[in-house]
Image: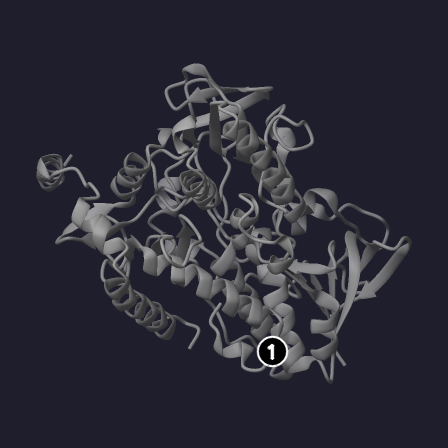
Amino acid sequence: MSEQTKAQQQEEAKAPRFEISPRDRALMNNKLYQLWRFIVLNIKILKAVDHSKRS
Amino acid sequence: MAKVVVVGAGFAGHTAALYLGHYLGKKHEITVVNKYDYFGFVPSWVWVGVGRMDPKKTIIPLEPVYRRKHVNFVQGRVTEIHPEPEEQYVVVEKAEGGQARLDYDYLLIATGPYLNFEATPGLGPATGNTYSICTLDHAVQTRDAYLEWVKRLETGARARFVIGTGHGTATCQGAAFEYITNVHKDLVRRGLRDRVELVYFSNEPALGDFGIRGIKARHKGRLVSSAEFMEAIFRDFGIQWEIGRAALKVEPGRIYWEDRDGNYGETTFDFAMLIPQFKGQGLHMKVLGPNGEDLKERVFNPSGFVLVDGIYGLPFERLERNPDAWPAVYQNPYYPNIFAAGIAFAPPGPISVPHTTPNGTKIAPAPPRTGMISGIIGRLVALNIVDLIKRGRMTHDERMSEMFAACVASMGDSLWDGSAVVIVVYPVVPDFRRYPNEEGRDLFVTHMEMGLSGAWMKALIHYTFMYKFKGLPGWRIIPE
């Protein structure tokens, strides 16, 4: 195992466990914020379609 | 006048039929053969399975769509392919009875999976032990059984529901994930969640593997793996998980399994929805030469999937370093006028790291080729057939190692308080040459998030795709 991989694994082990915080939960159902995320997600997907071999 | 036969009218076959009808329908003969007389929008069957969507809203009768697109339709099942140049026809067992012979210049096999419940003794709705949401009939059966349990829960009963995969090499874990989170939401809505122990049972090596060896995406300034993400969701929802397990046998209320270390054990349940192993429909087709000789191994691999232009037989260590091993045009190397799309094509190998237990049991999710991937390949093959007929050469190609996919996993259908995980992954098959990071993926495009906007996306996808699959004005603008 390379030194870099070991370092990455140690870094990952130190990183806090991913949890859904009360703030995340509130944002996930905040209609205005979610409208923003909806627009961003649509743009992201359409951009990916545009970059793909479809176009 | 060229004759094109499309076998199957799912995401891949129906998409291909729409494009073929649009570009060739008036001057050439396009025929679709499908077991059912409707197109089923499979992603919405998770909602049917919890009684949150009327099954009728998930299907489109095929004949009226094809009539408008100048495409012939035969309801039935292809039983024989005669691929040699002097023959080139398929034999169809028609749903109304009798057989028909369909000549072709180009054949597209887009038959979807054969649901191999038999690979796990005791699995599947036919046994009455477990349920499935892989066909509309199955989803309706599952709904009825689930709602029956809801009635018992309302009278004070407690239960243990197990949802996941029913074989060591099953795929489509996304559907199981969606179903369990929708069951969770539905039980919360009914005030019954505390009476049910929910268990996710899967062959994945880690949660969120989904047969594409999971993904990593930037979230709150650091790279978060789909495993961490899914674990956080399951902890939040109070769902237990048992992963890296191959269901070996099912008896009423009991799954016998083997884990990745070769240990054996049992998981009990009161209600279970387990996705079976997928095999190819080629298992049930004959491929015959002019003198009746068996030519099956030229078209299908032993699992019944169509051999195409991929590089087969590479050991995993070489396959994962060679993105060009994945097929580009989905054309059979022996018969260049036979193509495959969607689940029907044989992948060159797994995307997730394969694993065999000390007892010799394979536990590794198979690569997914459903939904968006099927639609993209269906369109690509259709456009290449149009090219071959009009120009004599193909101009489209796209490997799964060049393909992007978006997956919206519903976690409650309500537009007010529903939720969904949105996963954008590019490319589907990691390409370590183009993206020399640990993931082999574009970490800018690859994305993962959850929230109400995902539920809106899922609803948007349902209605726009139902519109597209009806072939109504402007349908081609909607991406696959």
Circle 1 chain? B
Q: Which residue is mark 1?
A: B472
Q: Disc 1 residue type?
A: Leu
Q: Residue at point 49% right, 78% down? A: B477
Residue B233 horizontal/vertical position (percent): 30, 41
Residue B296 horizontal/vertical position (percent): 71, 47
Residue with the most extreme right position: B98
Q: Residue at point 39% right, 24% down? A: B260
Would residue B309 be found to the left or right of residue B206 on screen?
Answer: right
Q: Residue at point 57% right, 21% down? A: B249
Residue with the most extreme front position: B155
Helix, strand or loop at label 1? It is loop
Q: Quadrant of residue B82?
A: bottom right
Residue B359 horizontal/vertical position (percent): 46, 17
Q: Quadrant of residue B210?
A: top left
Residue A7 horizontal/vertical position (percent): 8, 38
Indicate whether B300 appears above or below B275. below
Please state which of residues B472 and B88 is positioned toward the viewer in this rendering. Answer: B472
Please state which of residues B3 and B20 is positioned toward the viewer in this rendering. Answer: B20
Pointer 1 local density, CA inside 10 Å: few below 14, some 14–19, many at least 20: few
From the image, which quarter does the N terminus of chain B lie in?
bottom right
Would residue B324 be found to the left or right of residue B291 on screen?
Answer: left
Would residue B397 be found to the left or right of residue A37 on screen?
Answer: right
Residue B329 visible from this viewpoint: no
Indicate whether B440 appears above or below B382. above
